[in-house]
Image (spheres, helix red, strand yellow):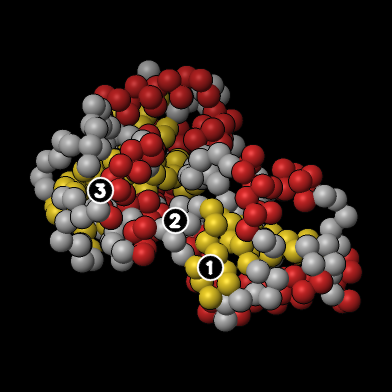
Amino acid sequence: MKTAIISLTKNGGITAVKVKEAIGGDLFNRVPPEPYMTTVLRRPLSVLMPEIFDKYDRFVLIMAVGIAVRVVAPLIKTKDVDPAIVVMDEKGMFAISFLSGHLGGANDLALELERKIQSIAVITTATDVNNTVAFDMVAKKNNCVIPNLSRLAKVSSAVVNGRLIKVASDFPIEGRLPRNIVLADEVKKEESVRITNKLVTAFPGLILVPKNLVLGIGCRRGTPYKKIRKALTKFLHEKGYNEAAIDVITSVDIKADEKGLIELSRNMNVPFYTYDPDQLRRISSKYTASAFVAAVTGTPSVAEAAALIHAKGGFTIVPKTVVDGITFSLAEVPTKIKI
């Protein structure tokens, strides 16, 4: 988690150092205190911010809110990619959650500053003020993707205005729900929520996709990325699972340098792990064995065994399936949704 701390005045520089000592981060001080002269900010703020906006996860801007508005406004994209921004006065009295309070973590950052340097956290997000459920925070806490983020505002508005919200979840929910949020077997309205790792089409409400699937892959040496990518898309469509739910790609050790799998991992932005054949053989009673695969790789199963072993107490939900010469399997990590 990279943090940038920016100040524009002498007193602001003193507060910036206090913030750094409390939470860490990189200093950019227009007027730095004596021991921190190397952190001097020589470029205009309007030049600096576009240069570093995408390089940091969190910003503490020690300046007037009006300055922060003007410098940040042209850089804002969407709430799922914007960094957390907290604005502080130069004396460090207030820590205002300014941008990306939930998904980016600005609310948490403001509260952290309150705990560590005794600033007063100022949080204005409606769900927090009304002490109710924020589904973007539910997503963040439970490592979920929101594929239709544009629908979040409608659901959040309904929550804070006390309207009934129905939630259908494929996974157990832990925690106390407000009275206007109820569990249901089926949801159809815009002001409803579906929590699932399956493909969902024509659903008008908000979708949360837990990243709880482990994808196992076995393929011939030199199989090109495009072929793997096309086969995977077909596999997931046929089996009815959402690609966004895939958290890890796995295989056997001899595939650790397989270019097609490495490229798949990079393009999907998920890690790629491999396992020793001995590890995979130890759970041979739990998967479908293949003598041919054993002869080539040293283990009777690659895709199914690798996915299952990485799921750590999970279970196979799609056994080994061959699509265009490439073997896939899915295992699901045990999942509970915490509210």
- CA gap, disc 3 and disc 1: 26 Å
Q: Position of residue 241 (x, y in %)?
A: 29, 34
Crowdedness near tag 3: few (<14), some (14–19) or many (≥20) residues, C-alpha within 10 Å: some
Q: Is residue 7 left or right of residue 83?
A: right
Q: Is residue 37 left or right of residue 222?
A: right
Q: Residue at x 65, y 69 (%)?
A: 89
- Nearer to us of marks 3 and 1 is 3
Instruction: Answer with mark 2 or mark 1, whichever residue precedes in sequence.
Output: 2
Instruction: Answer with mark 3 or mark 2, whichever residue precedes in sequence.
Output: 2
- CA gap, disc 2 and disc 1: 11 Å
Query: Can residue 30 be seen in the rendering of this structure?
Result: yes
Amino acid under disc 1: Ala
Pointer 1: what residue?
Answer: 110
- Choose between 60 and 186: the one closer to the eye: 60
Pointer 2: what residue?
Answer: 102
Which residue in the rendered view is the most extreme toward the left?
185
Query: Can residue 317 be seen in the rendering of this structure?
Result: no
Q: Position of residue 171 (x, y in %)?
A: 21, 52
Which residue in the rendered view is the most extreme toward the front?
66
Pointer 3: what residue?
Answer: 158
Q: Say what secondary structure mark 3 lies in.
A: helix
Q: Position of residue 312 (x, y in %)?
A: 34, 57
Q: Say what secondary structure mark 1 lies in.
A: helix
- Nearer to us of marks 3 and 2 is 3
Snapshot quadrant of residue 189: top left
- CA gap, disc 3 and disc 2: 17 Å
Q: Residue at x 51, y 71 (%)?
A: 121
Image quarter hosting the C terminus: bottom left
Image quarter hosting the N terminus: bottom right
Amino acid under disc 2: His
Q: Residue at x 30, y 25 (%)?
A: 237
Snapshot quadrant of residue 28: bottom right
